[in-house]
Image (cartoon, rainbow, N blue to C red):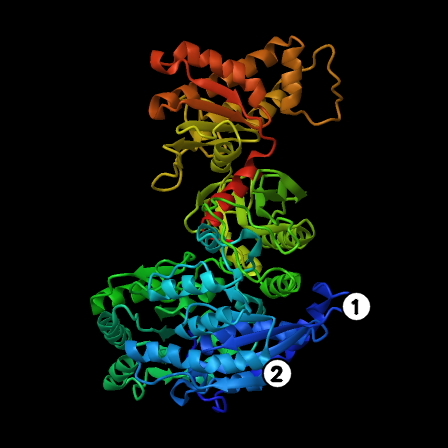
Amino acid sequence: MFAGIEGRNPHRLTERSTHELYYLKMQREREQVEKMENNGKRKLKVCVATCNRADYSKLAPIMFGMKANPEIFELEVVVLGSHLIDDYGNTFRMIEQDEFDIGSKLHTIVRGEDEAAMVESVGLALVKLPDVLQRLNPDVLIVHGDRFDALALATAAALMNIRILHLEGGEVSGTIDDSIRHAISKLAHYHACCTRSAERHLIAMCEDHSRILLAGCPSYDKLLDAHHRDDYADIIKAWLGDGVKEQDYIVALQHPVTTDIKNSIKIYELMLDALISFNKRTLVLFPNIDAGSKEMVRVMRKKGIEQHPNFRAVKHVPFEQFIQLVAHAGCMIGNSSCGVREAGAFGTPVINLGTRQTGRETGENVLHVRDADTQNKIYHALDLQFGKRYPCSKIYGDGNAVPRILKFLQSINLDEPLQKTFCFPTVKDCISQDIDHILETQSALAVDLGGTNLRVAIISMKGKIVKKYTKSNPKTYEERIDLILQMCKKALDDAVGLNCRVLGVGVSTGGRVNPQEGVVLHSTKLIQEWSSVDIRTPISNALHLPVWVDNDGNCAALAERKFGHGKGVENFATIITGTGIGGGIVQHNELIHGSTFCAAELGHIMVSLDGPECTCGSRGCIEAYASGIALQREAKRLNDEDLLFTEGMALKKEDPVSAIDLINAARLGNSKADAVLRTAGAALGVGITNILHMVNPSMVILSGVLASFYESPVRQIISQRALTSAKDIQVLTSDLEEPALLGAASMVLDYATRRTY
C-alpha cells in the first residue's frame, strides 16, 4: 500500500520523534490494559512477522503497544519479503528506526515479478521459516492481511502447532487476495477484524464466534492522532516541491491485479496519460511486488514520469508522512486499499480504478471506475473528484483497536486445546462480543435544533435514549455551531463510560434542508441566521464521524418508520404539530424529498385563499391556523378582548398567554375558544385530506404536543370531505416521546450500520 524512498533519504523529516511520541503514548495507555496478576504467570511470547511496507503500518501500533508493556508481553520480530529488497526501499530500516530488535531477517522473494516467482517465493519462505519458528517457539504468531508471504507464515505456523492471530480477515476486495485472505483465516486460531461485515463473513466461514474480535484497524490508532500535525506543509514541500499547496496535488498508487495482469498494465498506462493531461502536481508511488509490477514500472519509465516536472516518483514514504500527504491531497487515484480505508478518515476524494478493492466497504469519498478502459473516462473522474471534500468516515476504526487487541491477546488461554474447531451450520446475524464479553451498544448521536432549545442525545440501536442534553438555542450561527460541538464532544466522552459505540451523528433541524450536502437551504424566522448553512462539514471535521442532516418533519417520519407506528408500513404520512406544522411522507418505504427538497412541507399547504398570514409569507396555510404560534396568536386576541378567561381557569394577568390557555378555555365551555380550535382542526383535517388525495397513504400519524387534541377533529373532517376510497384511512397519534431525536438517530442507524463495525 505505501511505497518508498530509502530510509536515509533527505526528504525524511522527523518521523523518529513522532515514533518516540507514539511510544510514550502507548506507555500511558498501559493503564488502560488490564495487567496480569503477579501470580507467577509467565509473559506471553508473541512473534510479529512483517512482510512488506503495507502490513508494517498495521502491525507497528500493536508492536508499540506490546513494547510498552514488557511485563506482559515478550515481543519477537521477524522480517521477510519485500522489506529486504533494495528496489522496494529496504523498508526493514524503518523497523530498525522504530527501535525494534529484529530477531530474524529472511530473504524469501524470488525475483521475476510474475506468477511463477510468487509461487516460488511462497515455497522458499516455507523452507526457511521452520528453523526460525522452532528457535523462537512463540505462544502466538500475528499475521496480517492477504499477501502470499503471509500465507506461507500461516501455513508454517499451523503445521508447527503455533497459535495464529490473523488481522483483517473476513474482508472482500474482489481479487485473488480474497482467496489468500480466506485461506489464512481458515488456518488461524484467532481473528481481529475491522468491520461488522468482515465479522459476519468470518462467522459465515464457520469460524468460532468467541474467537473473533471486532477491533477496528490498528493503523487508525495512529492515523486519527496524526491527522492534525502542524508540519503537514513541510511534508508536502519535501515530497512534492516548492509552491505546492494543500488540496492542489494528487497521490497516485496503482498495484497489479495478478488475475488480470494485462488489463492492469493497460489501466496503469491510461491513468498516467490522464494524469499528464490533468496537469496537476502528482506524487506517484511504485507498485508492490506482485506479478506484473515490473511491467508497470517499465510503463512509468517509458513515459518519462521520473523526469516529468509535474511528477515525483518514489518507492517509499514513511507512514506518518504518507497519511499527511493523503489527508491534504486534492485527490487520490489508483487501486490501493489506502484509498478505500485510510483516506476515508480524512474525507479525501478517491478514484478507485478497476476491480481491485471494489468488494470493500467504502465511504462517500470513493468513486469507482470499474471499467477504466479510456483515458477520457479516468480524466472525467479526476475532474469530478479533484478538490472536493467529503464527510470523514470511521468505517475501519475508531482509534482504539490496539488496546482491544492487546486485551484479546491476554485473554488467550494457552491451556486450551490447540486444535481449532469450526461452527456448523453457518451462524447468521450473530452479535459480536467485545474482549470482556460485554456488547458495546451501537449508538447514534442525535441533534435536534428547535426554535427554542438545542438538544443532543445518545440513542441506542433499539431507540432507547441513553442520555440527553438540553441547552437554549443561541441566536447567532457561530454560537450555535460552537454549542453543538461542545455538546456532541461531551456526549462522545460520556458514551465511552456508558459502553456505547457512536457510529455517526444525525441532525434534525427546522427549515428546508438538502440532505445530500448536509446544508440548510432556508429557515423560517423561528431559527435566526440559519439559511445557506453547511452543518455537516464542521461537525464531521471536528468529531471524525459521518454526519446526516434532514428537516425535522422528515425526521419525525423516519422515527415512525424505524421505531413507531410506521414500522413495516410501506406508505404513510407523518404530521408534526407543535410550534409550527411540518411532516414527512414515506412512499414505497422511502422518504420523499422532492426535486428542490421542499416535498412534504405540509404546514404550508394552503387551505384558504384569504386566511391569516403565515410565517412563510403566504396566507391561508395550515400552519397559520393550526400551529402552536397560530393558537397563541388567537389566544392573545381573545385575551385582549377579555373573551378568553372562563370560570375555572387559573389565569393570572401577569402570565403570558399560550395555546394551552386557549385549549383549557375551550374545555371549560368557552365558545369563542372552541370556535378557534374547531377552525384549526378543520384546517388541519382539510390539509390532510388533500394529502390523502395526492399520495394516498395507508396511514396518517399525528405527532407533537398537539397531536392528541387534533386526532378526533381530523378523523371527522376526513369522514366528511375525503373520497370514499380514502375515508377508512388509519389516523393514529404517535407513541414516540422524542420523534425529532429518534428520527435523527435513525438516519445514522439505518445507513451507518450498512458499512461500519
Which residue is outermost to the right?
39
> In front: 466, or 384?
466
- Residue 641 seen anywhere in this rendered image of the structure: no
Callout 2 environment at 10 Å: few (<14), some (14 to 19), or many (20+)? few
Q: What is the secondary structure assignment of the residue under circle 1? A: loop
Observer-side mark, 1 or 2, equals 1
Give the residue type at disc 2.
Ser
3D distance between C-alphas at marks 1 and 2: 34 Å
Q: Quadrant of residue 19?
A: bottom right
Q: What is the secondary structure assignment of the residue under circle 2? A: helix
Side of 654 where 502 appears, left or right: left
Earlier sequence position, callout 1 versus callout 2:
2
Q: Residue at x 60, y 8 (%)?
A: 671
Residue 270 placed where, x, y %? 23, 72
Quadrant where the N terminus is found in the figure: bottom left
Residue 375 placed where, x, y %? 22, 69
Residue placed under numbered mark 2 in the picture: 17
Q: Quadrant of residue 281?
A: bottom left
Q: Residue at x 57, y 86 (%)?
A: 97
Using the image, determine if residue 331 lies above or below residue 23: above
Side of 81 where 453 appears, left or right: right
Q: Residue at x 50, y 27 (%)?
A: 565
Residue 231 placed where, x, y %? 55, 79
Residue 33 placed where, x, y %? 70, 64
> In front: 368, or 407?
407
Q: Quadrant of residue 663?
A: top right
Give the residue type at disc 1.
Asn
The label on residue 38 is 1
Using the image, determine if residue 393 lies above or below residue 644: below
